Amino acid sequence: MSLTAIPRAKGAVLGLGHIPRLLLRGPLAVLRSLHAEGPVVRLSIGTMPIVVVTSPDTVNAVTVTYGKASQKGRLFKQMRPVVGNGLASSDGPQHIRNRRLIQPMFYKERLAGYAEIMRKRAEKLAGSWSAGQQIDVDKVMGAHAIETLAATLFSADIGRPAVESVREDLPIILQSMLLRALAPQFTVNWPIWKRFNRSAARMRLVIDDVIAKTRASDLDSGTDLLSLLLSARDESGAGLTDEEVRDELTTMLFAGTETVASTLSWALHHLAEHPDVERELLEEIDAVIGDRAVNFADVPKLPSITRVLDEVIRLHGVVTLMRTTTEPVTIGGYELPADTELLFSLYALHRNPELYPDPDRFDPDRWLPEQVAQRPRVHVVPFGAGNRKCIGDKFAWLEATITLATLLPRWELRPVPGSKPPTEATAAMAHPTRMPMIVQPRRKH
Ligand code: HEM
């Protein structure tokens, strides 16, 4: 069957396809509107056809049923020169092997160790503010997420220069990564990419240096992710090469910072807009933790925070993911040949009004156990599903919970009066535009 059997989305223009619709309405609005045109629809970017799956069942077919019949697709291929061949962009046997090697680093006992680092970073952040200070929440959370992840990746003493460099260079790379991935190869040395190229090269050098120094040190003693990566062995006893380790570290930094920063920023925004929800969180934190520092064992006892995070990620999730089929598949009744470009948006799925009534409303009660029990599992996939599901999901919620449980009892954050409410900028996540807020100490502290 050819792709022309699939209904074509409205608004295509001869030769340009849906580019004008995407430019005029914006990708978020277009992606959100497509479910009304069917569970499988065809978009054209210029003359390139892309099949978009829009329903929970068709997204599940792509990610789970046919998870092994596809590769990560065009978007990730284009990003390879930047992120290398780490977990998020590798395919086939390399992906399976490295995923197995890396998975134990996210086991419970490891997470307990990272929780301690997360708490220290959150306390440092809370201690850095003064009464009445104005902060750009988006930037502060960006730096916090980078520093926290870097601190769990590298051992404290060897990794310090890497943390500094990553804090400076990663935001520059993240800012233009999507554009760079789409830019034609012959432009890569153009002056517009000077800052980007310099930051990418510096980050590579610094990470290579940390890898070399960590290898030279006593690996067995390290509990940081890098030491674990360096000592991981597959069944044949083989470990990862330095290049593979660098790619995996870089991938973690890309996959695990903007996502967490965006979630934390939006959480603080919604809590400021919903003081009743904030109060519920404060009461829970007070009852479970009181005046002591938050620890790993506290996290499952803070379900109100989890509900807020679940609602935030429903509203502001990953915008675009892609796959390319490697063999013929049947999705939503349509037969798709090998080499079909597939696209799905978790952001759009989680704002579908048929699945979530009044979808733009922030309502953490949607995640009360009795409501969750009624919702099919395939409706809720903020971290993806199947063989490419996020490896850092528990890490992310742990970090976000510890950060909120540390900051909220000490500081009240409210938007700067008269400031424009943040809107959603489209990158990997629907992360917020500038979010200026004033911090005030809470009475108890
Ligand atoms: C709110 C936070 C996060 C969200 C919403 C998120 C979301 C996702 C999603 C949707 C995928 C699947 C992509 C696909 O199907 O193509 C993914 C993959 C991935 N994520 Fe996350 N992520 C988050 C945090 C993290 C963190 C903290 C880390 C690392 C410490 C991480 C590391 C990864 C990696 C390595 C992959 C690729 C997995 C593979 O293909 O085997 N993520 N993430």
Image (cartoon, rainbow, N blue to C red):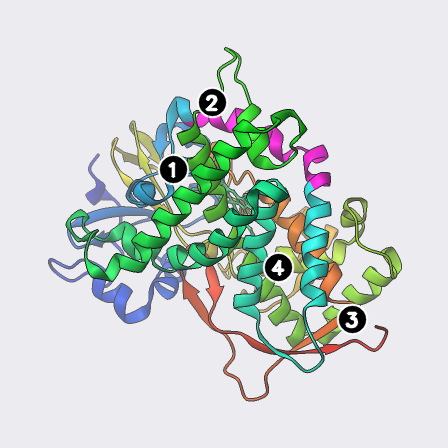
Q: Mark 3 — residue?
A: 279
Q: Mark 2 — residue?
A: 97
Say what secondary structure mark 2 lies in. helix
Q: Amino acid at mark 1?
A: Ser
- Mark toward the viewer: 1 or 3: 1
**Lower sequence index among marks 4 and 1:** 1
Q: Which residues are magenta?
A: 95-113
- Which quadrant holds residue 214? top right
Tell me how far mark 4 sits from mark 1, CA to CA: 28 Å
> Mark number for residue 311?
4
Asked whether residue 180 appears in the rendered view, the answer is yes
Tell me how far mark 4 sits from mark 3, CA to CA: 17 Å
- Which quadrant holds residue 409? bottom right
Tell me how far mark 1 sits from mark 2, CA to CA: 14 Å
Q: Position of residue 242 (x, y in %)?
A: 43, 29
User: Decide: marks 4, 3 in contact (CB < 8 A)?
Assistant: no
Q: Mark 1 — residue?
A: 89
Predominant secondary structure, magenta span: helix
**Lower sequence index among marks 1 and 2:** 1
Horizontally, residue 131 falls left or right of residue 218, namely: right
Say what secondary structure mark 1 lies in. loop
User: Decide: marks 4, 1 in contact (CB < 8 A)?
Assistant: no
- Residue found at x 49% / y 46%: 253
Tell me how far mark 3 sits from mark 2, CA to CA: 46 Å
